Image (cartoon, grey):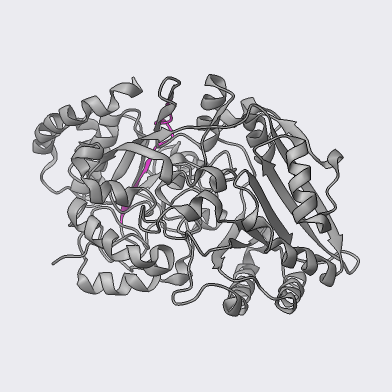
Amino acid sequence: MMHAIAATANATLVLFSCLLLTTSSAQPASNISSCLLSNGVRNFSLPESPSYATLLNSSIQNLRFALPNVSKPAAVVIPSSKVDLQRAILCARDSSLAIRVRSGGHSYEGLSYTTENHVSFVVVDLMNLNRVQVDMVSNTAWVESGATLGELYHAIGQSNMSLAFPAGSCSTVGIGGIVSGGGFGLISRKFALAADNVLDAILIDSNGNALDRGSMGGDVFWAIRGGGGGSWGVVYAWKLRLVHVPHNITVFSLGRTGTVKHIAKLMHKWQFVGPYLPDEFYLSIYIPTGTSNGNVSMSFTGQVLGPKQYAMSVLHHTFPELGLAESDLSEMSWIESIAKFAGLSSVDDLSHRWLGAKQYSKSKSDYVRSPISMQGTINIIKYLSNGPQGSIQLDPYDGAMARIESSKIPFPHRAGNLYSIQYGVSWHALDNGQAEKYIGWLRSFYAYMAPYVSKNPRAAYVNYLDLDLGTNNWMNATNGTSNGSVIHARSWGRSYFLKNFDRLARAKAKIDPTNVFNNAQSIPPLQY
């Protein structure tokens, strides 16, 4: 079935030239249901439906956006086919509703299921568009955008234990979201980003047309691979290049506890190791806030595409301070390592999309281009030790990622970046009255980090969405854009995309000039 996706894309254009005749007159938001029903879409829920709250909340991963004061959609539509998806888009557009498309619901700012300024909207949830077809002859896979990373990984593992795909470690993240933003993962230093390994896609545009790589055009195909979600249309499915990994690889997780100075020494040394290891190595650092008996803690996550002996030999030479012992290392298949790092008890759990605890949280990100001094590192650890429930994670870059030009796809954070920092703070429902206190601390810490990170602009990773960088502030479901909107959006857009931002704005004008697909940080169309 999935092999036929590209072949049927052009045929779909004919279908929708007819369908448009039945939905062309504008309808109020209350008529979204009649439009869907008249066009054969049955699987949707309205606010008065018993299933509405369950469906809406099912994929809200950040509970900040499940609170009563957050705007709710006029409908939740769950298409079961490409045609359902096309019809849902047309009905939402012609009912004057903003469109929010949800793949896994992991948007850090809830942009796949909320709107700003009380604009009426519909959520198109892709959870039933989760089919994966692996082709072992070509080492490729067609994956519908509603599939989770776990569902993709499980399908790959079932087909061939020596094939893999370079993307994230959280199994419930949706393919549509992570690939749209780039998709960094544990084997990206060897095989680059998820978006670097996209060969084709089927994009549903604002007119309901299904466009493959050739028919959407080079600029749009460039834009959807790392230019962020919610701007271009809806990617129904992706054709992915799979990569070869050893049958057995090495993994480890190490915890270290000590004084501020001891932990700072380990972090400081890691800066000269993690980004410079052979491409087969991934070695990250996680440091939580707080202290225990006056000490602070950190943990290292390692994955090596090779045997134990190789991992031990390289790390003993480059990072003896780590104190790595052979008993710390385990050999397993790549798919088993995926389940381990996702915190799952078995490989089969990867196919379950409703795993993991949800939380109230806020996140931010940075890139580091020069090693932070020893004194600077000590100061950072001290700051962390006095914080509320939060953490930083340092992910090493370089490797294959750095050998790709920064303009190859919209994701620009290539050569010259040593590592990324992801900042996070979280709290429980009982602490919701203190939410601003937690978020305020995170913002203060982020401001404190300014001297140590990239500048002009201070860069950020679009998959770690952060509305503190700026927002579009749309007042309408569609339209409402101007060249002034582009100038305003550059203030945050260049943090994510650097010099690639203007090309993204031009691509937006080609595929969606009336701004049907928009959100608080979508790309506005650059009109001439």
In the rendered view, does 272 fall on the left or right side of 411?
right
Q: Vertically, is 354 above or below 444? A: above
Q: Vertically, is 22 above or below 177? A: above
Q: Give residue 53's position: percent from left, percent from top.
A: 47, 43
Residue at figure coordinates x 64%, y 70% from the top left: 371
Towards the viewer: 307 or 427: 307
Q: Give residue 262's position: percent from left, percent from top.
A: 84, 67
Q: Vertically, is 186 above or below 40? A: below
Dividing the picture into quadrants, the one containing residue 480 is bottom left
Q: Is residue 131 visible?
A: no
Number of marks in the image?
Answer: 0
In this view, which residue lies farthest toward the right?
Answer: 293
In the rendered view, does 189 fall on the left or right side of 405?
right
Dividing the picture into quadrants, the one containing residue 294 is bottom right
Residue at figure coordinates x 39%, y 31% from the top left: 129
Residue 442: within the magenta? no
Residue at figure coordinates x 51%, y 65% from the top left: 416
Q: Is residue 347 visible?
A: yes
**The C terminus: image quadrant:** bottom left
**The N terminus: image quadrant:** top left
Q: Vertically, is 136 above or below 320? A: above
Residue 128: within the magenta? yes
Towards the viewer: 436 or 513: 513
Q: Give residue 354's position: percent from left, percent from top.
A: 57, 36
Towards the viewer: 49 or 445: 445
Q: Give residue 459's position: percent from left, percent from top.
A: 48, 68
| Magenta residues (range) | 120-132
In the rendered view, does 31 fall on the left or right side of 372?
left
